[in-house]
Image: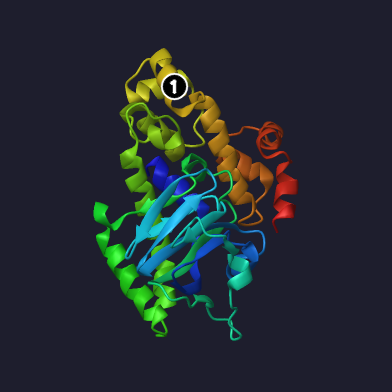
Amino acid sequence: MDALSDALKIMRLGGGLFLHAELCAPWCVSSKIQPRICARHLGDDAQIIPYHFVVEGRMRVRTDDGVEFEVASGESVLFPRNDRHLLGSDLTLPAVASEDVVQLSPDGGLAAIVLDNAGPRTRIVCGYLGGEQVQGNPVIDALPSALHLDARRGGSAEWIRNTFQFAAEQITAGHQGSEAIMGKLSELLFVEAIQLYVQTLGESSTGWLAGLKDPFVSRAMALLHARIAEPWTVDHLGREVGLSRSALAARFNEIMGLPPMQYLTNWRIHVAARRLIEGNRPVAQIAQDVGYDSEASFARAFKRIMNMPPGAWRRLRQ
């Protein structure tokens, strides 16, 4: 399995919808999704990746770091770290907080926002991906504050967007059954957005996603993920990917920002953290599964990275 697929798999993201909106210009809304909105699906402590899909019309989007762009009908925007952002027909207007204008459904259905002004109408549906282990995942950490899935760029998964468009139109028209479809498609939409973003990275880019574009670094990452418990050394890894020890170490560190063995340690702890909350297997067995000969050495590494012992991590999340 390649490193991207592995990192996405361990997130175990669940998707769903929580809101549809009809917004007539002029309007400007400040938005940040509160976990309580999705609590019935994910729990109060879930990490949320919200997205907005434009069914009709267009809107401007601005993130807190100043990036601004337009999202048109059939396009979507995702926020990997759930950063607060502005949406609107005119972002120079005073913004209203989304939580102040949301109308909750009395029967537990989708919430709604209706801003019935005199200008052109924009219809959007808002959904989310979420899971326990999003925070600290190398994919999430490497992404920008917003991912714009531009319909004009095409892509190998255009059928996802077409199906998404159809389901969204059914939802806004009041038809039942399409919410489940969109929930299943949300993760595929996220994966496509990541893949398209990776394609935009230049040759001088650095970071986890940039490593996927380098043939030697990506091969090294794939090996470390696929054989996580193996007693790797940089010499051994270099032989596997076809580089000398020093060449691999330099290349990996330049692109990824850390040495190969430190990357392996971080990934082992990330995998172990997921396994600790998935069941009741002994800590010693999980330590062995991710490459540690002793529970003590595993516990030291876990506490150094996660700021608490593995047993405390498990108790906190059960």
| Residue 159 sits above or below residue 5 on the image | below
Dot 1 crowding, Cα within 10 Å, few <14, some 14–19, many 20+: some
| Residue 268 sits above or below residue 94 on the image | above
- How many numbered marks appear? 1
Q: Name the colour scheme.
A: rainbow
Residue 120 position by quadrant: bottom left
Q: Nearer the viewer, residue 93 or 269?
A: 93
Task: Identify the residue at image location x=43%, y=17%.
Answer: 250
Q: Position of residue 175 (x, y in %)?
A: 39, 85
Report if residue 149 is visible in the image: yes
Task: Identify the residue at image location x=38%, y=60%.
Answer: 76
Task: Identify the residue at image location x=52%, y=56%.
Answer: 86
Residue identifier under label 1: 254
Q: Position of residue 165 (x, y in %)?
A: 32, 70
Check disc 1 and give the amino acid type: Glu
In the image, 232: left or right of 193?
Answer: right
Task: Identify the residue at image location x=36%, y=80%.
Answer: 170
In the image, 275: left or right of 185?
Answer: right
| Residue 71 sits above or below residue 110 on the image | above
Q: Position of residue 141 (x, y in %)?
A: 52, 41
Report if residue 155 is visible in the image: no
What kind of element bears circle 1? helix
Q: Nearer the viewer, residue 301 or 11?
A: 11
Q: Nearer the viewer, residue 13 or 170?
A: 170
Rendered-image quadrant of the C terminus: bottom right
Rendered-image quadrant of the N terminus: top left
Q: Nearer the viewer, residue 300 or 96?
A: 96
Q: Position of residue 25 (x, y in %)?
A: 44, 69
